[in-house]
Image (spheres, grey):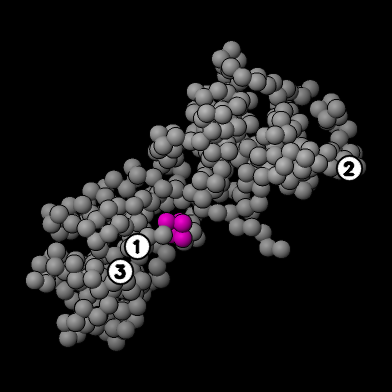
Amino acid sequence: MTFSTVSTDLDRRFREAASAEGLLDVAYDLVDTPIGPLLVAVTDRGLCRVSFDPEPEREAESLAQSYGLRVLRASRPLDTARRELDEYFAGRRHTFDLTTDLRIEAPFRSAVLEELARVPYGATTTYGELARRAGRPRAARAVGVVMNRNPIPIVLPCHRVVGANGALVGYGGGLDRKEALLRLEGVLA
Amino acid sequence: MDDVAVPPFERFYLEHRDAVFAFLGRRLGREGAEDAFQETFLRALRGYQSLRHGRELRAWVFTIAARVVVDEHRRRPRQTPTDRVDAGTTEDGRPAYAELEDLTNELPATERAAVVLRYGYDLTYTDIAVALGSTEAAARQAASSGVRRLRRKGIAHDIQHRLD
């Protein structure tokens, strides 16, 4: 048998048809950036995940548990997200126009993440301040946990949240990346 | 034992795409296989949410692929280069596979798949073995114990004409 495996082209056509027909719960793909490859995932409601150091197989399992079993790697549905991320890393985009899908987040977490989305490019805020804005002034520590588990880093800019004394404190993707993002935005020299 | 969880579609697709494509190639030739491949996995995707467990998924997708082959033969009976199959219809005009899928509902999954693929879709035991992820001998064994079970239940009588 000379044609017993699926060609790259046929594989690509199937993945495109599957997303074009609206049959997917989640589409994801890898996006190359200056701070390493990111796994980026979208549902029909919007962006639902950005992961550093992606392990696609594990990620697919977790996306399936959260959003439905029909999870497929497909390039086209990620076009907009890929373009906006490219522009951001090139310094040409300061705000993302992407919608986000936070349906699986508990109310406190999504309140915090929505406040986080308002922290502007090139600025920083503190965990305590973000807690206050989310209506829970004493929950700075809990806000730290929400930041650490932020499902959509970069687009929801948890890298702009620092300690009360200005220290970077921590970052789900590692402090090097937090520094690189803040440098890109001109916050750090 | 707990039911096996249905995997994310991506994993299911990666695990079975080459086997399905090879099967379609044997039935339809290369060109036909490409269209049929896409159709098979689109149908699988449409039905994926209704799966109750993750057992026998290869047999499940082979059943879909076999049905796509039947549809393809109906659509263009003259253009099929290899191994033409007529899966046949029953007296009331239903396709044989549809009738068998109903009647074999209560068989254990492996036997059911073997019976449906053999007698409903006319697959060879070589292909059924691939579909079941087993050997040819095991595929024969599954089909024949499925038929025995149907006979004991008195069901085989209704489909005797297919099983002989």
Disc 2 is placed on an element classified as loop
Kindly identify the residue that appears in the image at 44 percent across and 34 percent down: A7
What residue does disc 1 label?
Answer: A53
> Closest to the observer: A13 or A138?
A13
Q: CA distance from mark 3 to mark 2?
A: 61 Å
In the picture, measured across the screen, residue A79 lies left or right of residue B46, that is: left
Q: Which subunit holds the residue at mark 2?
A: B
Kindly identify the residue that appears in the image at 25 percent across and 73 percent down: A175
| Residue type for callout 1 | Asp
First in sequence: mark 1 or mark 3?
1
Kindly identify the residue that appears in the image at 69 percent across and 21 percent down: B86
What residue does disc 3 label?
Answer: A173
Q: CA distance from mark 1 to mark 3?
A: 8 Å
| Residue type for callout 2 | Lys
Q: Which subunit holds the residue at mark 3?
A: A
Q: Is residue B150 visible?
A: no
Q: Nearer the viewer, mark 3 or mark 2?
A: 3
Quarter holding the C terminus of chain A is bottom left
| Residue type for callout 3 | Gly
- The spot of residue B101 in percent (x, y) is 73, 37
